[in-house]
Amino acid sequence: MYVAQVLGVAGAYYLAGRLGLMRQVVIDGAVVTPLWPPTGIALAALLCLGVRVWPGIALGTLVTVTEIGDAFTVSRLAIMLGNTVAPLAAYALLRRVGFRNELARLRDGVCLVFLGAFAGMLISATIGSFTLLLDDKVPPGRFWLVWASWWAGDAMGVLVVTPVLLVLRGARWPRRNDRWLEASVLAVAVVVMSLIATRSSLSMIYVVFPVIIWSALRFQLPGSAPCALVVSVLAILAGTDALGPFAGHSLMEIMANLSLLNGCVALTALLLGAIVAEHKNIRRETEYAVEELEALVEQLAPLSGPDSGRYEDRPRRHGPLDGGPHPDDP
């Protein structure tokens, strides 16, 4: 079982790397991508399966890095080391602050953004960029440009891919038909709005945000995280082909615009979805606490009179504390 998990992580990392490299950008000899999905897969694997699957990340990184160049060198070994250590460091930081995979609290979303994505991916970007600098593949004057592009791609991988994998692990099928209808309309809307935003020559890039907000308010992260992924993928396809609002811009301008758009979309989906989920959980816990308090009051001070009834004889809403669904659950 353990070997299968390691090989599965390695295979997923490699396939995600191949997908990411389909839209690679070469900046002064450095191969970077606007979104590097393997970092999101690596961190999600560590969070779900534990730190023991790190050999799968190392193996997947080794195969992916080897395919980029003609030969395996010491510099590529250093890049492999950085890409392996970065998600491990992000995992350690998240576990240290009590991160929960359900992403049902605002603090979990904030920790994933600042510790998992922004802080953790500093390692891979720094080691990779310095390696290319020492290998004379990046001019000293362009170091920070390569570093920023590398870091942004790795961070976007965590912000966009990791939430999708975490919510899919615990996702439930909607139990009401109207939720299926709304989810279908939402799926169509996010694709249509994303195509309009990324293919139109007009400045309509922000029309995707109402759809992201809708998905977060109605479906929380199980809805907003996949929507953010769709927007990011379609934006990268348009950006790397210099279509729509990305036409006529330089490569670095396109990379900067893609990073800002993907970052804003991912942050909106992640943080707003976590806020809504946290508020719903607080409301449910409050309702259950009130019901339990009512039961205690009824037992300590029973009502008198022929029409009075014991609390346990009265109809009562059932929730997770009683083994039943909550009325607001889909």
Image (cartoon, grey):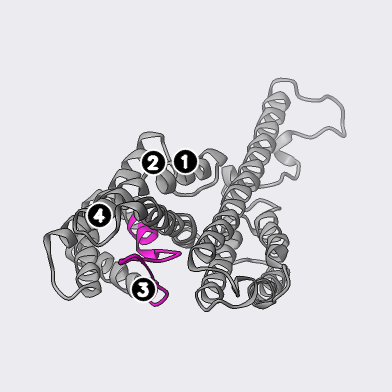
Query: Could you say whether the residue bearing mark 1 is in a helix, strand or loop?
Result: helix
Q: Which stretch is magenta?
A: 19-44
Query: Could you say whether the residue bearing mark 4 is in a helix, strand or loop?
Result: helix
Lower position in the chain sequence, tag 1 or tag 2: 2
Amino acid type, callout 1: Cys
Position of the C terminus, as image quadrant, is: bottom right
**CA–CA distance in space, label 1 to label 2:** 7 Å
Query: Could you say whether the residue bearing mark 2 is in a helix, strand or loop?
Result: helix
Q: Is residue 35 magenta?
A: yes
Residue named by callout 2: 94
**CA–CA distance in space, label 1 to label 4:** 31 Å
Lower position in the chain sequence, tag 3 or tag 1: 3
In the picture, the disc for residue 133 is 4
The mark lying in front, picked from 4 and 3, is 4
- Residue contact at pointers 1 and 2, CB within 8 angstroms: yes
- Residue contact at pointers 1 and 4, CB within 8 angstroms: no
